[in-house]
Image (tube, coloured by chain):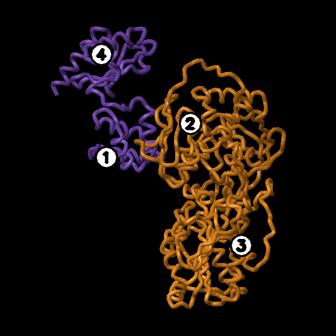
Amino acid sequence: MHSSTTNVPMVKIQVNGQEVEVKEGSTIIEAFYQNKIDIAHYCWHPGLSVAGVCRLCMVEIEGNPRLQIACNTTVTPGMRVSNVSEKVKDAVKWGLDFHLINHPLDCPICDQAGECGLQDQYMKYGRNDSKMGEAKVKKHKVVDLGPRVVLDSERCILCSRCVRFCDEVPKTSELGIFNRGDRAEVGTFDGKPLTNKYSTNVVDICPVGALTSRDFRFRQRVWFLKDKETICTGCSTGCNVKAYYNKEGVFRVKPVYNAAVNGHWMCDDGRDIYKFVNRENRLIDAKLVSGGKTEHMQPMELAKRLGATLKGQGASVALVLTGSHSVEEYEAIVSYFKNDVGTTQIYHWINNPDTIDSFDGILIRGDKNPNTKGLIEVLAKNGVSTQWKSLTDSIGTGAVKTVVVAGPENQALFPDMKVKISELSKAAKLVWMTAGKNSELESLTGDVALLPLKTYVEKPGTFVNHAGLRQKTQPVTSIVPGALSLVEAVQLFRGEELVAKPVQEGEKPNEIGKGRVHNEFTLTRGVW
Amino acid sequence: MFKLSEEGLKYVKSELTRYETKQSAIIRSLYRAQDENGGWVNHDVISHLSEVMEIPAAQIEEVATFYTMFNQKPVGKYHIQVCCTLTCGMMGGRELCDAMMKEAGCKEMGDVSADGMFTFSKVECLGSCDTAPMLQINRDPYTENLNMEKGLQLVRDLRARGKGH
């Protein structure tokens, strides 16, 4: 499936009268999927093994008297396949009717409504009254599968995607289908919680409302959310994601397929990092504390005033950077400090030096920054090489009088935040630019300036991941309107005016990585 | 905590090498463990097998809950499985089952009698219609060509045998 080997011979087949080419050894459903031709299916998923249990991907193959399932039939040269014949439609209709026998039809209170495979297929193939006169089988509802996943067994159609996911991706095999026939239910052995680091992916791949995300459920109807692609800034892997947002902020992120970065998946920690971008966790006001006096003002105003005091101050000013920002921002601010301020006292704050090189073998990396590579690149290009110790030493001796800190963007990933605040606030003057609110920073009494920054969803930028892959993102939405990106801050430092460029609806999709195709479940589930 | 006997462990290990995939050995191993655990399997049994066989517990539980031959509740010393499918049913299998249960002191299907001797289950066709009505005790060979009298005598004999041991 989507293998990177290029020397596999191609096979020509006909799908619904249209000639398509697929790699030899592909299945019929892959021919449909790769050529974006609709086919009903629940259990097949491009990132998992074939189960062949939902019986919905029926196709008619010319010369074959019986319908076949497309997910488990290999293509042969010249094969003529159709899934639009009356025979296929009838088979899908009946397949769907069987799936719905014990389904509770509780769409009005189901969190999956609007992105549900059953709804999608029903509108296409069903639209009939159920022929089932028997009472529906009662099963377990609102089961805590784990800290992140909630199960409703009555809605489950036993496609086994979640079971296969746990077997094949995190290889933890917590889930199984227990009992038989209409009593069969998904569950964990002995009620053990589903705690693997990738558990929320089962919510994404569940084609119905059986598995829902504890974090997201009941917070928004999906049709009230817009989505835009960006990347995950939770670690140096740089998973491609879609952020779902409305005017109140971001509500969830889901992975977007990129073979070169994250495949179909993302980790659970990455699902949480959208939280820091929302207004309730943000630094809103620019604040200047000087000589015992506190002034609140617009961020732009503060940036202009700071620029005037920083210019030409030379080596008495030090800049601290984290791996949270984009290459463009690093270039702007490093160039400003080197050329306008006249200092090469630029330091890289590494948040977790002990675990920075760790990797769990799937996606999670110990470097909890999206752009450490980018920062190192820009520092090297500008000939900056410094050791953290010399900063603390020069603060101690008074050689450095002003410390300017940019970041971190997501403070939760910086366990040493407190330590660094107390260390750096020993400088005579502290300028801290960050996106999140922080009570320690806000209660500092010395000579302190706080400048709110934008987060990764509010600005364009390039991030270099652990493998050196450059991924460019576009803004998703605006959450704190006054906040600045480092590029904008530098413009203001220099006394230039900002040219407003509001986030436009329907801006062209982000160009992230190469070889990206839409996952079925991040578009409309079940059909794509 | 349940643990397989030394011999049982040897058996399970040899089953593991018999098939192309380890999963194929689950049914035979579960049977063995069920016998050693007094006729039923619980989470302890499955956890132990999972450790011994190096197969995720969920996969063993899937098999144990799928097949009715694995009892998920304790059973009596004699688990009497009476066939009540078509032929046996027509030949009085159900009435036989009810009468034997009464004799054995079992109120409901699946109950263990007060003396710990009996559990009754109605089962689907065991493939011996020519000898209807018939039943199977534990995993022993079938007891066939029954009638009411023979059935009741069987319960009495088993009780005597069970106490004798």
Chain B display color: purple
Q: In the image, what residue type sits under mark 2?
A: Leu
Q: Which residue is nearer to you in this view: A35 or A412?
A: A412
Residue B9's tag is 1
Q: Is residue A146 above or below residue A508?
A: above
Q: In the image, what residue type sits under mark 3?
A: Glu
Circles 3 and 1 on the same chain: no
Residue A88, image x and y in percent? 74, 30
- Subunit bearing disc 2: A
Task: Name the residue tied to disc 2.
Answer: A158
Q: CA distance from mark 3 to mark 4?
A: 90 Å
Q: In the image, what residue type sits under mark 4?
A: Met
Circles 1 and 2 on the same chain: no
Q: Secondary structure at mark 3?
A: helix
How packed is label 3: few (under 14 Cα within 10 Å), some, or many (20 or more)? few
Q: Nearer the viewer, mark 4 or mark 1?
A: 4
| Sequence-first disc among 3 and 2 | 2
Q: Quadrant of residue A442?
A: bottom right
How packed is label 4: few (under 14 Cα within 10 Å), some, or many (20 or more)? many
Residue A301's tag is 3
How packed is label 2: few (under 14 Cα within 10 Å), some, or many (20 or more)? many
Q: CA distance from mark 4 to mark 1?
A: 36 Å
Chain A display color: orange
| Sequence-first disc among 4 and 1 | 1
Q: Nearer the viewer, mark 1 or mark 2?
A: 2
Q: Secondary structure at mark 2?
A: loop
Residue B101's tag is 4
Q: Which residue is nearer to you in this view: A438 or A346?
A: A438
Whether the residues at callouts 4 and 2 have beta carbons within 8 Å, the answer is no
Q: Looking at the image, can residue A513 be seen? A: no
Q: Secondary structure at mark 1?
A: helix
